[in-house]
Image: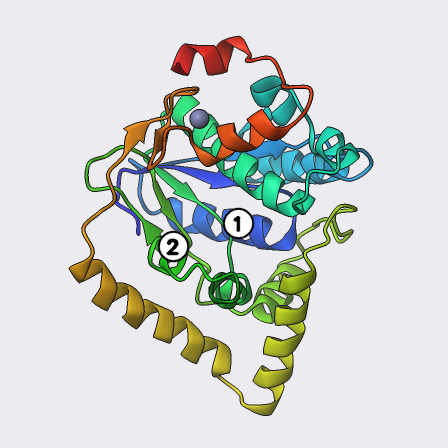
């Protein structure tokens, strides 16, 4: 996943997973003098929730001696998650927030000149997403995800998930044993009904049949290997609005932003990418 001279942008939200990832990578990085770590945090604009998390993230960065780069939805897209929730758009807030967060982290990583983006997805997140994609009828998404997401043409910064083999329970245990302070409150808009059902189902199955989450992850890995060998990489164009690589005329984030009313104005930073 990592080279000895990588500049790693670690996506840090202030939750247990991202603070565990940051702590572990900082420990590892000390052995590689040419490497560098910067924490990138996204302020989605969630009143009474994100401020606390950002403060905890900032404190941890200071303690570990890591620079933190914060970007906000408001400044990048002209809209906050709270604004999006006010509108009834037919999709869950999480589906908007997920796409916009990915774009915001990409922007932040590009701004600091990072060579890798590390996110703190754990085993539970990964296997939930595999089942979610299958139940949404979108199996090709399974192929386009995985522990390392890389474009051989170099159109986007490689994304890695160093904790993807670690069950969530073990991360919680590590965070407590390491004395990490993290945000424990859940997002007030978090309402992914199907993912919640899948989480309960997988936990139930894991209790009855230990190791089933690992098996599901390995199954997806085998599928990825087999299918990616036969399917050519999808053709990438520049998004007509923001210039980011996409398989369509507009990238997913720009399509979403177009659907939000009133249409947010394009800020100078976004305009620079057009
Ligand atoms: Zn776009």
Comparing labels 2 and 1, the label whose residue is closer to the camera: 2
Task: Specify whether residue 121 is in view.
Answer: yes
Could you tell me how far apart the alpha carbons at marks 2 and 1 are, in whole angstroms?
Answer: 24 Å
| Residue identifier under label 2 | 145
Quarter of the figure with residue 164: bottom left
The residue located at (78%, 40%) in the rendering is: 49
The secondary structure type at the circle numbered 1 is helix
The residue located at (29%, 29%) in the rendering is: 237
Closest to the observer: 74 or 3? 74
Q: Earlier in the sequence, mark 2 or mark 1?
A: 1
When the figure is inspected, residue 122 is found, relative to residue 239, above or below; the finding is: below
The secondary structure type at the circle numbered 2 is loop
Quarter of the figure with residue 109: top left
Q: Is residue 72 left or right of residue 160?
A: right
Q: Position of residue 165 (x, y in %)?
A: 44, 67
Q: Quadrant of the C terminus?
A: top left
Closest to the observer: 176 or 158? 158
Residue 23: numbered disc: 1
Density class for disc 2 (Cα within 10 Å; few <14, some 14-19, many ≥20) is some
When the figure is inspected, residue 112 is found, relative to residue 7, above or below; the finding is: above
The residue located at (58%, 34%) in the rendering is: 41
The residue located at (75%, 53%) in the rendering is: 184
């Amino acid at each position: 996943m990592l080279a000895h001279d990588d500049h790693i942008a670690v996506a840090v939200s202030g939750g247990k997973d991202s603070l565990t990832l940051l702590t572990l990578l900082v420990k590892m990085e000390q052995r590689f003098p040419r490497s560098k770590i910067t924490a990138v945090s996204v302020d989605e604009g969630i009143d009474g929730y994100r401020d606390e998390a950002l403060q905890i993230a900032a404190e941890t960065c200071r303690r570990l001696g890591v620079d933190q780069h914060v970007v906000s939805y408001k400044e990048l897209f002209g809209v906050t998650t709270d604004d999006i929730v006010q509108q009834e758009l037919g999709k869950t807030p999480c589906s908007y927030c997920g796409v916009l967060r990915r774009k915001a982290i990409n922007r932040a990583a590009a701004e600091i000149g990072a060579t890798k983006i590390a996110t703190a997805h754990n085993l539970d997140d990964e296997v939930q997403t595999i089942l979610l994609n299958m139940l949404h009828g979108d199996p090709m998404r399974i192929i386009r995800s995985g522990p390392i997401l890389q474009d051989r043409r170099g159109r986007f910064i490689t994304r890695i998930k160093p904790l993807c083999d670690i069950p969530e329970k073990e991360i919680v245990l590590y965070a407590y044993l390491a004395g990490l302070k993290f945000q424990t409150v859940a997002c007030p808009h978090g309402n992914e009904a199907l993912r919640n059902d899948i989480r309960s189902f997988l936990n139930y199955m894991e209790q009855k049949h230990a190791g089933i989450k690992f098996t599901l992850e390995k199954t997806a890995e085998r599928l990825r290997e087999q299918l990616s060998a036969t399917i050519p990489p999808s053709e990438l164009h520049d998004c007509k609005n923001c210039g980011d690589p996409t398989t369509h005329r507009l990238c997913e984030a720009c399509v979403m932003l177009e659907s939000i009313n009133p249409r947010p104005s394009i800020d100078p930073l976004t305009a620079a990418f057009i």
